[in-house]
Image (cartoon, rainbow, N blue to C red):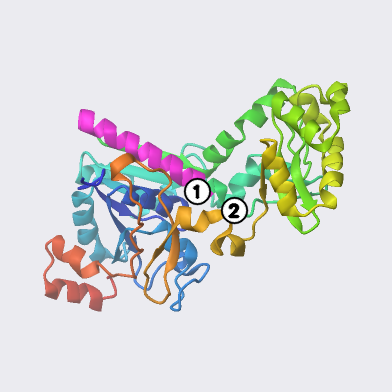
Amino acid sequence: MSAILESVRILDFGRYIAGPFCAGLLADIGAEVIRIERPGGGDDRYLMPATRDGEGAMFLQSNRGKKSLTLDIGAPAARPVLERLIASADIVIANFSTGALRHFGMDYDALKAIRPDIILTTVGAFDARSDMAEAVGFDGVGQAISGAIYLTGEPDRPYRSATSYVDYSTAISAAFGTLAALIRRMRTGEGGLVEATLAGTALNIMNPVLMEQEAGANVRAPIANRSPIAGPSDMFRARDGWFVMQVIGQGMFRRWTKMIGRADLLDDPRFANDIQRGRNGAELSTIMAEWAADRGRDECLATIASFNIGASPVLTPADVIGGAMGLHDTYFRKVDYPGTDGVSLARPLASIGPDAAEMPRRPPLLGEHSDELLAGLGLDRAEIAALRGAGVV
């Protein structure tokens, strides 16, 4: 069966995570994605080195399944090549500022003049119509301006999430919008502009907390690892390691009290429902911590599971790669890549029936497909050699 996005060509001018991962998700379902970066490679290719030649883990993940073309899009000699590429493409993905898009002649109006039904997907820090349109921003900015960092950690020291969840969530949002625009084009023949922002994503994720604040129903404060909406829901330390346990709902709370032998807690008004248990969770966490302290972690987890309560060990990255809980074999596939003994790439986010891509395609080497792609645009060997000699390719 053919891939879902077979025959769809995407030009990926993304950098770091949000733009490239968006394009990578579309490559997972069959699109021909051409990553375009400057000769010598962009900075994001070499972050978190994971190969003997220095390519980074973030690059390897976000650029799986793509082709690579090196092109200095700011060079005058590159403009004719860039216009041919745009004319051949269905979608352009770029996480440049609005000003940078205009500077490179890649704003929506400029692209539409070359190909009327083009779809342009942009990823920025802030909305293009806001006063912050040209501001530089990364994942941490989204976490900070949404209120998430303030609520993470302890009262006297906020913490940023160790994972770039705003970047990755924005990439998913951008891919969702791109697919919607592609469906609309199939129906109407019209292209369009898709815009996703780190700020918009972060504020969507925090929306319930913000609505609660707006309504005056609750003013949240950082409470470390405890949940503010139920309990006991926290990180607990057993004799030989940490685990997380989350008790939500009356039935599960009742089972938990039976597990620890504290049926009296069911009659305590402080713990009458999830709301009250969230507000008084410190006491519940203390009780659970005392229960766990003298037990081994595996014993704790086995007992908790026998009462049908949600819990898991707190794993290290080494634990995951080492096969803990069967996660590596289930969710990752080993892919060959030059300069490595193979890299573990996560399977696509969603399995889509018989079209599911179980084996991610490897990321490209720098400029690996340049000659092939340029020849496909009609350039002959002499023209390609001239561009390479001028440092444009």
**Residue bounds of the magenta highlight:** 167-189
**As drawn, 141 above or below 66:** above
Q: Which mark is residue 168?
A: 1
Question: Can residue 134 be seen from the camera position used here?
Answer: no
Q: Residue at x 49, y 42 (%)?
A: 197
Q: Quadrant of the C terminus?
A: bottom left
Q: Main secondary structure of the magenta part?
A: helix
Q: Residue at x 45, y 78 (%)?
A: 52
Q: Splitting the image into 4 quarters, where does residue 309 fall?
A: top right
Q: Amino acid at mark 1?
A: Tyr
Residue that label 2 marks: 163
Give how far across and how far down residue 331 sits, in percent. 47, 53
At numbered mark 1, what does the secondary structure look like: helix, strand or loop?
Answer: helix
**Alpha carbons under labels 1 and 2: distance apart:** 9 Å
Comparing 291 with 205, the one in front is 291
Q: Quadrant of the N terminus?
A: top left
Q: Which mark is residue 323?
A: none
Give how far across and how far down residue 153 sits, in percent. 75, 48
State yes or no: residue 185 in magenta: yes
